[in-house]
Image (tube, helix red, strand yellow):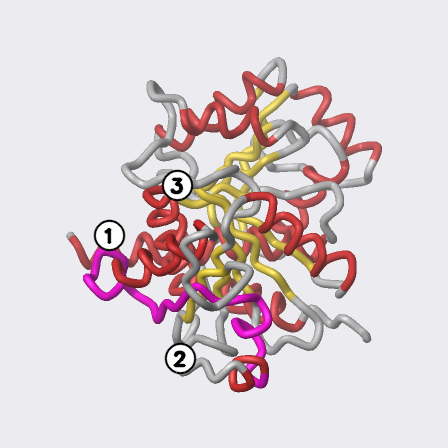
Amino acid sequence: MVHTHEKYERLIEVCRALPPLAVAVAHPCDRTSLESAVKAHEMGLISPLLVGPRERIREVAEECELNIAGLPIIDAPHSHAAAEKAVELVREAKAEALMKGSLHTDEVMAAVVRREGGLRTQRRVSHCFIMDVPGHENVLIISDAAINILPTLADKVDILQNAIDLGHALRFEQVRVAILSAMETVNPKVPSTLEAAALCKMVDRHQITGALVDGPLALDNAIDLEAAQTKKIDSPVAGRANVLIVPDLEAGNMLAKSLSFLAGADAAGIVLGARVPIILTSRADSLQSRLASCAIAALVAAKRREETLVAG
């Protein structure tokens, strides 16, 4: 099957009407991270602020034949300092998003969630994969498969709301969320089915808003209409979900990587719940995935600006 990336291309095309997003790029000191920032800049998606060892960034640009002329470089001696400086740029309103460079995710997130000087909000921080799966009509949001290891019910409220808000930022016509488990019936011996039922009741009580939500649902009857009909599941979500909330990080990580390595899917990634969207890229990601991550951050930031204007 030829993968054409048309779903990511649609997201990128929408962003062309938006002003470039000011992004603090923490420690872009290898080809993957610097190329991501430079190519996204050339496409008009972002306006990068390169934060890290100035001479090392210039060396990488020269080695990889990347044009960084005119891009600001904010000198920081090492990766920890780069993460802290990038967060500081956001706090000073000089950047509207953060982008992980060639440093470990933990280094970036430690600076983000620091109680003093970080980017915390009342929401719990969570990660979303935005999957471009060959043969699947639209992108598929999976959360949380990268940050929250064993999320509690309270954590899942924020994980769910963050994912719903992302669906709206990506301009889904209708956000349909499946709370995943190994089965579609509530079983007291399987905690994830109880939490799914509780989350659905919280939706009924408007504690979580903005989407159609159902669960527990098994993966097959969440995304395949025939499977849902075979199980006689009467639901506006079953078989049509475009957001999947997984029980824990292990399940989500295995699901996302199964789609990538067995089905040829691409995975863009973003962290939500902080003051600004955080672009997480991996050396294993395709360039198209990395560019899509930048486009997604731009759409999230645009949605937040729109909400701020309405509120003001």
* Mark sitting on residue 117: none
171 shown above or below 202: below
Among numbered discs 1 and 2, the one appearing first in the sequence? 2
Identify the residue under disc 1: 308
Among numbered discs 1 and 3, the one appearing first in the sequence? 3
Identify the residue under disc 3: 152
> How many numbered marks have been drawn onto this rendered protein structure?
3
Residue 19 versus residue 88: which sits nearer the camera?
Answer: 88
Type of the residue with mark 2 = Ser
Q: In the structure shown, which secondary structural element does the residue marked by tag 3 occupy?
A: loop
Q: In the structure shown, which secondary structural element does the residue marked by tag 1 occupy?
A: helix
Quarter holding the N terminus is bottom right
Residue 113 versus residue 304: which sits nearer the camera?
Answer: 113
- Segment colored magenta: 203-226
Residue 242 spot, x, y in % from top left: 50, 69
163 shown above or below 135: above
36 shown above or below 211: above
Per the model, the C-alpha gap separating discs 2 and 3 is 25 Å
Per the model, the C-alpha gap separating discs 1 and 3 is 30 Å
In the rendered structure, does residue 224 fall within the stretch colored magenta? Answer: yes
Q: Residue at x 36, y 39 (%)?
A: 124
Among numbered discs 2 and 3, the one appearing first in the sequence? 3
Identify the residue under disc 2: 235
Per the model, the C-alpha gap separating discs 1 and 2 is 34 Å
Residue 186 spot, x, y in % from top left: 41, 62
